[in-house]
Image: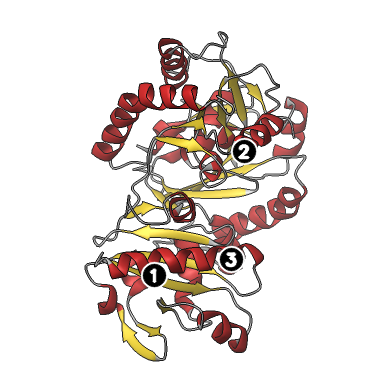
Amino acid sequence: MAAALFPEKLQKEGNEVSTSDVLAGKKLCLIYFSAHWCPPCRGFTPKLVEWFKNFEENHPEKGKMAVVFASSDRSESDFNEYYAEMHGFHAVPFADRKAKDTLSQKFKVQGIPTLVIVDAQTGNLVTRDGRSIVTNDPKAEGFPFTPKSLGEILKGKYLKQKEEVTEEAFKDKYIGLYFSASWCGPCHRFTPELVKTYNTLVQAGKPFEVVFVSADRDQASFDEYYGKMPWMALPLKDKRADLLNSHFEVQGIPHLVIIAPDGTTVTDDGRSAVGSDPTGEHFPWKPKALRKLNENTISAVNETPALLVLTGDSEEQHKQMFEALSGEAASIEEKAAEMKESLPVVMLVTDPEDDETEKMLRRFAKLGDDTCLAILDIPSQTVYKAEKQDLAVDNVLAFLHDFRAGKLAGEKLSR
């Protein structure tokens, strides 16, 4: 039930109202992550207010949608001033920070403003990119905004070098959707790595195909860049590129999503997978709960709470911790697979060959030199430091279990 996403009571213009009553009879619930201090939020909020007002006054389905404000404001007075501008919206009470953080974590909110749309009855996600709907569909003509399935999006014609093929070319294969562009420096560095891995897997007879989804600005640039690639591509400016970017919520490039033959997502961090496993030994790269902390795996912290086991350049301590945590990792992976959900947490143990990434994380999360055990939860902008800074296995696991049980008090990351 969608009501279970929220506290029992929501706020509406100074009054408490039952969440169940708010959502009764509604088709959609829009969750608006925003804050008074955020300039892009201040620019988008009036547009959302006007869009919702027009819906409520003119749309044939008026009354079938609710908007709930989930605030990242720094004080209740800022919240009250900002919320006063949101006519017709409900809000998560400012005092209930845990409810707001839980929403941010569930929907992997990494920045604001973010507008998440869910089914108001089931709570199932419709899209995390509600901003694009508000911008591109001013009259809400696409309501209830049911997205096309991935299978529907992928149907059609493709390029395979100079030939034209269809989706039959990757039938029964794992697909790597490669979002990239010729003007992107990091893409130019990653593409040759992906070419080597692709060729290795294909030569070994693995069922793998890559599809280039280009963000190039002109045909000449596309042709030159694609000429360096041995795989398939969407034609430049193909409308499916926008649909795929929206479907996978691509925020930056290069970005590599690995899809299983049945259409399920294996990992949306294929770039890290290829970087840490260039020979494809662990293909198709199902997400691992336990990983070395290095430049190839650091991106995992952006979307998932991460247990940081900071062992510096000690190979012996790294090996001991990796072996000791393997059982816990297997349990986490098994439960996530059973529930068909993403990993709820990852465990990162410093790669002794790359302690620079550890140092970078220490600076980012302000951990200092004495912290060896912490949890970084970027989706909720919180860091948790273990009360007992001891890498004894029992202490590490107790710290992790307390976090997952909601027993820890963390510190907000400074902006």
Q: Residue 168 at what x, y percent from top left? A: 25, 78
Disc 2 is placed on an element classified as helix
- List x then y, in percent, for residue 216: 60, 77
Residue for point 56% across, 14% down: 386
Q: Position of residue 107 (x, y in %)?
A: 48, 42
Q: CA distance from mark 1 to mark 2?
A: 29 Å
Label located before the other in sequence (1 or 2): 1
Q: Quadrant of residue 57?
A: bottom right
User: Is residue 296 shown to the viewer in this render?
Assistant: yes
Towards the viewer: 148 or 143: 148
Q: Quadrant of the C terminus?
A: top right
The residue tagged 1 is 210
Identified by mark 2, the residue type is Thr
Position of 83 relative to 222 (above/below): above
Residue situated in front as seen by the camera: 138 or 292 = 292
Disc 3 on helix, strand or loop?
helix
The CA span between labels 1 and 3 is 15 Å
Eye-nearest disc, 1 or 2: 2
- Give the residue at mark 2: 357
